[in-house]
């Protein structure tokens, strides 16, 4: 992985005129061009508005009692979903209509968050530039995660748009288009879909993308095949992070008998996540990860007093995310030391711990630098220097893990193939 400028190859797309990931505006413009070219099959409508009043745009192709709902941009730091959503619609329109089947593509579920990441999309797609513009919301501000029905929070407007679409369309299949920054490809399913695993694995191999065979995002989940994970029943999710699949738009589809596939593809692949062999010297590796994460989080926490307290469009979400991620790290370290250091772990699991130990401080430091960007004085200068030091050290650590760029067209092609594979298994034969 290097931070020099990188020439990206063009996505083979007649409507998406970009050599990298599209912005939300470009994705919407591409959808409108498709609707003009195919007025008998394709239409674009506004499904609702975000918290900040941005449109949530739905592109629909054909109609039928059997629906596929595709969700792009659920996490704003994962722009592959916008490109894949448009490319998917183009591919559907290249094929004859499938009797009784309608395709519905929500181009971007979180346009407010996407706006805070778009600075990266207009330059070379390097890791350093990505994190200069990095934003990922705290858990309770991610639209796919629904609040507990007995809790104090209410669903976000974006969440209500998505659950409303699910209630209206009753999709046989919902595909959520995600992307990890570092690691491998994997799929999370709300219910078993056995025949998908082989097709997903072959698609990843076709793109030279490793499967994540011991994913940190699916700790404790049943894995019927490498890179495939089944969402757990209530109360059996990740105990450290407050992500409960049963309280999500993924599980919401099940009330209408539908299946959700969360499709993950990496921006920077790390091949070791595909290694299921036993890892050597697990206690030392886990202790090193814990020490690295603990020390860097302590250093970043000490910078919080230098962050000014003021209002601003970007300021609040960035600060809440920093505070959330700082709070998450100590329980992660406790879990590693209590449960992992004495257990037999795979190379993949140890590698994911190393990725997390580098990635969490990198994300926090990057968002702190955005919060401190306009601050003056020696104290702010010193805080920025320390945050830059943490970010640089974390990027170097990921480079040592062998991170390599996956071309955008490769990411998009894999996600598109995976959606069609899942649809073939759940929809009536053409």
Image (cartoon, rainbow, N blue to C red):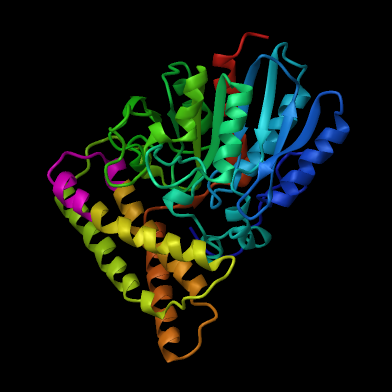
Image location of residue 103, percent across then percent down? 68, 25
Locate residue 290 relative to residue 85 in the image: left or right: left
Which residue sits at x=56%, y=64%?
Answer: 133
Please tell me in which quadrant of the rendered image residue 400 appears: bottom left
Locate residue 91 relative to residue 401 in the image: left or right: right
Which residue sits at x=80%, y=28%?
Answer: 42
Locate residue 112 relative to residue 369 in the image: left or right: right
Please tell me in which quadrant of the rendered image residue 392 appears: bottom left
Marker count (numbered): 0
Question: Any magenta on residue 268?
Answer: no
In the image, which residues are magenta? 333-351
Which residue sits at x=73%, y=34%?
Answer: 59
Residues 124 and 252: in front is: 252
Image location of residue 191, percent across then percent down? 42, 21
Query: Main SS of the magenta segment?
Result: helix
- Quarter of the picture containing the C terminus is top right
Does residue 397 appear in the picture of this structure? no
Q: Is residue 421 above or below residue 45?
A: above
Question: Any magenta on residue 337?
Answer: yes
Image location of residue 258, percent across then percent down? 52, 20
Residue at the top extreme of this rendering: 429
Image location of residue 211, percent across then percent down? 42, 35
Locate residue 98 relative to residue 114 in the image: left or right: right
């Amino acid at each position: 992985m290097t931070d020099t400028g990188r020439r990206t190859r063009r996505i083979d797309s007649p409507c998406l005129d970009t050599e990298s990931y599209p912005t939300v505006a470009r994705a919407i413009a591409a959808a409108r061009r498709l609707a003009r070219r195919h007025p008998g099959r394709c239409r674009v409508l506004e499904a609702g508005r975000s918290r900040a009043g941005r449109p949530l745009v739905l592109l629909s192709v054909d109609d039928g009692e059997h629906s596929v709902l595709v969700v792009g941009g659920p996490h704003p730091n994962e722009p592959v979903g916008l490109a894949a959503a448009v490319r998917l619609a183009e591919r559907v329109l290249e094929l004859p209509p499938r009797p009784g089947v309608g395709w519905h593509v929500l181009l971007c579920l979180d346009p407010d968050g996407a706006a805070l990441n778009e600075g990266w999309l207009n330059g070379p797609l390097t890791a350093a530039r990505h994190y200069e513009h990095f934003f990922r919301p705290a858990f309770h501000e991610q639209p796919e995660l629904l609040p507990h029905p007995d809790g104090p929070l209410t669903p976000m407007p974006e969440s209500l748009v998505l659950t409303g679409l699910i209630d209206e369309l009753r999709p046989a299949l919902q595909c959520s288009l995600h992307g990890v920054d570092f690691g491998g490809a994997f799929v999370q399913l709300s219910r078993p879909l056995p025949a998908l695993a082989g097709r997903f694995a072959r698609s990843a191999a076709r793109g030279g993308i490793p499967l994540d065979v011991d994913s940190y995002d699916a700790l404790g989940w049943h894995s019927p095949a490498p890179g495939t994970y089944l969402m757990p029943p209530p109360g059996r999710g990740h105990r450290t992070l407050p992500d409960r699949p049963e309280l999500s738009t993924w599980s919401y589809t099940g009330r209408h008998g539908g299946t959700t596939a969360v499709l993950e593809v990496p921006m920077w692949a790390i091949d070791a996540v595909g290694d299921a062999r036993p890892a050597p010297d697990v206690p030392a590796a886990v202790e090193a990860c814990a020490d690295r994460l603990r020390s860097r989080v302590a250093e970043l926490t000490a910078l919080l007093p230098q962050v000014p307290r003021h209002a601003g469009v970007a300021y609040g979400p960035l600060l809440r995310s920093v505070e959330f991620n700082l709070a998450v790290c100590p329980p992660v370290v406790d879990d590693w030391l209590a449960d992992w250091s004495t257990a037999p772990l795979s190379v993949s699991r140890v590698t994911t711990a190393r990725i997390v130990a580098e990635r969490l401080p990198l994300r926090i430091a990057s968002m702190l630098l955005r919060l401190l960007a306009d601050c003056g004085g020696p104290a702010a200068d010193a805080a920025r220097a320390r945050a830059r030091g943490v970010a640089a050290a974390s990027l170097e650590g990921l480079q040592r893990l062998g991170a390599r760029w996956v071309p955008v067209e490769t990411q998009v092609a894999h996600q598109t193939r995976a959606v069609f594979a899942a649809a073939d298994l759940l929809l009536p034969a053409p």
